[in-house]
Amino acid sequence: MRRLSFFFLFLFSFLTGMAQNKNLDGVIAVVAGSPILESELEAKRQQSKQDSTPFNRCTALEDLLYQKLLLAQAKKDSIEVSDEQVEDELDRRLNIYIRQLGSVEKFEAFYGKSTSKFKEEFKDELREVMQVQKMQAKITEGITVSPAEIKAFYEAIPKDSIELINAQIEVGHIVKNPKINPELKKYAKDKIAGLRDDIIAGRKDFATAAIINSMDPGSAPQGGMYKGILRGAFVPEFDAVAFRMKEKEVSEVFETHFGYHILMVESIRGEEIDVRHILITPQPSPEDLLKAKAFLDSVATLIKKDSISLSEAASRFSDDEETKHNGGLIANPYTGSTKFEMDQLSQIDPSLVFTIDNLKTGETSAPSITQTREGQAYQIMFVKSRTEPHRANLKQDYQHIQDETLAQKKQKATNDWIKKKVTGTYVRIGDEYKTCKFDNHWVN
């Protein structure tokens, strides 16, 4: 059995069926009274096409058989998913699709129904998907691997079959946000408070004020407009204000780490809103920035003198909360690890490649300007490790080999579970798929 992304597959299946509006409802298999439809297999084929990955109908069907078996056992074991959990996950995933399509209007036009209607129709299906996820986790919970198992796994791989690892690099940074002069913070707050007064008094139009004044690049050109916002799409402080307001009401000034805000809700449609927004971010003075640069120069000097390690310097001095507790290392969003292939790094930020190109391992760059969520800041970059293309080995790739060892052990536990459960579960597979060579014996 392959490792699955159950939620994404199920959501893609549901959306594909809506978008294509086809009646692909032929039953191709049944597990514990739950049918597998031709449309579900078609959704997997479409997903493979979108991902540019090979599609095998037998492999795809076996994945679906496993899902249905998990669902049957989850219901038997009374595995529950709360309404709140379903709502939170649905909002999160719906926001992803809305952002991909560009707006709520485009989403609703594409699928032919409102987001609230979509959520209502999909809620039960999503609950089942989350039950399946919980059931899968239950099967493999508590499974670990020892160093001896990892070594045995690696040594059992034929030498000519050991995975080829591409050149990889680990990079990190230490970020220093300038300490903004209190007078400049007061100036920013007074400016947005003045805009609010003018809007309430009718001297200024909110949309026009946003275009001219807002420092939010995502909404300013559209008159500050964000359409189809669901709870959780923005920072908590924003949600706390936006979702308690009435239509056309202008908020008080409130603060987030981005700066000072005001907003006005244009319309409310069930659980989603259209909102206009103005952001004024306090700007550091040249002196504030120079102080941040000078601070990082002193940190770099300590590192070069071996007075402090890179990881300790990041932990003590960096203002980047996402990396400071990980030794300053930047996480690879594609893998979750701290190792990048160079093409992955260039896709994230081409300027990073230029900055680190001539850095030696353990060496820091000169301080340079960067843009953080809070505005302009200075950073120093460093390279923790570089590896050339090589066959995987225990010294350089221990974590990777450990992950593969654990995955194999969990797969065996899953296969054993399937073998045990299938003996007491009704499974029927359509004649056109009986010639498939499955990994497991689905019909006894």
Image: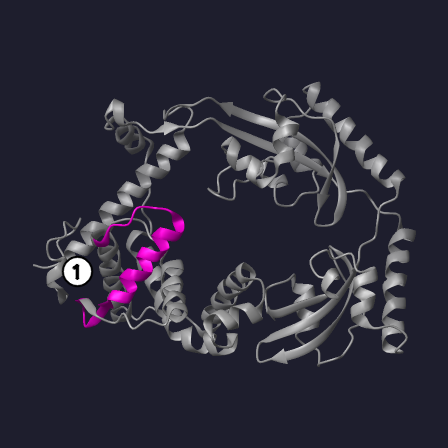
- Seen at 52% across and 37% down, the residue is 344
Task: State the residue in front, 50 or 260.
Answer: 50
Can residue 150 be seen here?
yes
Q: What's the image's color scheme?
A: one colour
Residue furthest toward the left? 444
Residue 36: within the magenta? yes
Residue 120 point in image, percent of width and height? 45, 78
Residue 182 point in image, percent of width and height? 89, 51
Q: Quadrant of residue 236?
A: bottom right
Tell me: residue 38, above or below residue 315. Answer: below
Can residue 130 be seen here?
no
Tell me: residue 73, above or below residue 420. Answer: below
Residue 247 point in image, percent of width and height? 71, 81
Tell me: residue 347, above or below residue 245. Answer: above
The residue at which mark 1 appears reads as 421
Secondary structure of the residue carrying numbered label 1: helix
- Seen at 54% across and 64% down, the residue is 98
Quarter occupied by the C terminus: bottom left
Please state if 218 lies on the left or on the right of 17 as rendered: right
Q: How many marks?
A: 1
Please state if 419 lies on the left or on the right of 270 as rendered: left
Residue 378 point in image, percent of width and height? 75, 37
Residue type indicated by callout 1: Lys
Q: Quadrant of residue 32?
A: bottom left
The boundaries of the magenta stretch are 29-57
